[in-house]
Amino acid sequence: MTKEDDQFQVWLMDMSDAIERFRQFIPADMAARLDFSPESLSLIEEFALANYPTIDDIKKQSEAKVVDGMARYVGQVFRKHFGGKWIIDFNDKKNVFYGLPQLTGMAGQRTQTCPLTLVTASVDRRTGKFIRTVFDNQQQNANKAQQ
């Protein structure tokens, strides 16, 4: 195992605690509604839009732990509903998600899924429904795969 692989294993082991730290950071009424449902993805996006006016704001190093918590939560919602597992690619430097945690093996999955980029893209697009739309599209793909 490489140093990067070891760090990723530590990151995985910290999943529940990191999500809990994120829940402690956000308003209590919002945290209480984070139940890993598809609907709760809208709360994550609402929080992101309220706190990060621009893509540059969400990418600040000072926000890394909060953004990581949001991305972990989003990823775990996807995993709860579609299966799969977290992976990280340190082999292909040309991979757009090189060095970023991704999800693989989800039911009906057609493309790489990186929860961190879902969170940051939601701030850039500012629709208020970006993450949920991606989830719903994944749900449609999963349903088709079952037929």
Image (spheres, grey):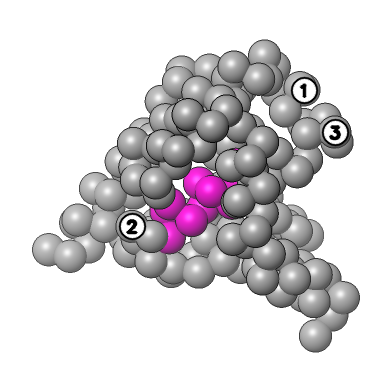
| Residue at figure coordinates x 43%, y 60% from the top left | 79
Q: Nearer the viewer, mark 1 or mark 2?
A: 2
Dot 1 corresponds to which residue? Answer: 56
- Tag 3: amino acid: Ser
Choose between 30 and 67: the one closer to the eye.
30
- Residue at image coords 63%, 41%: 24
Q: Position of residue 7 (x, y in %)?
A: 80, 70
Vertical position of residue 38 compared to residue 94: above or below: above
Q: In which quarter of the image is residue 101?
A: bottom right
Magenta portion: prevailing SS class: helix
Q: Residue 62 carries which label?
A: 3
Q: How many labels does the image show?
A: 3
N-term mark: 3 or 1: 1
Instruction: Please name the residue shown 41% across and 37% down the image.
Output: 33
Q: Distance between the residues labelled 3 and 1?
A: 12 Å
Query: Element type at marker 2?
Result: helix
Q: Which residue lies furthest to the front in this view?
A: 28
Relative to the observer, which residue lies in front, 138 or 45? 45
Q: Looking at the rendering, in which quadrant would you find the N terminus?
A: bottom right
Magenta region, residue range: 70-79
Residue carrying label 2: 81
**How far across and down, in percent of the image, does residue 9 sit?**
71, 74
Q: Is 35 drawn above or below residue 100 in the view shown?
A: above
138 relative to 105, above or below = above
The answer to if 118 sits in the magenta stretch is: no
Q: How far apart are marks 2 and 3 (CA)?
A: 31 Å
Q: For the residues marked 1 and 2, what is the alpha-carbon distance in whole angstroms?
A: 31 Å
Q: What's under tag 1, amino acid-wise?
A: Asp
Q: Which of marks 2 and 3 is nearer the N terminus?
A: 3
Locate residue 61, reporting x and y percent: 85, 36
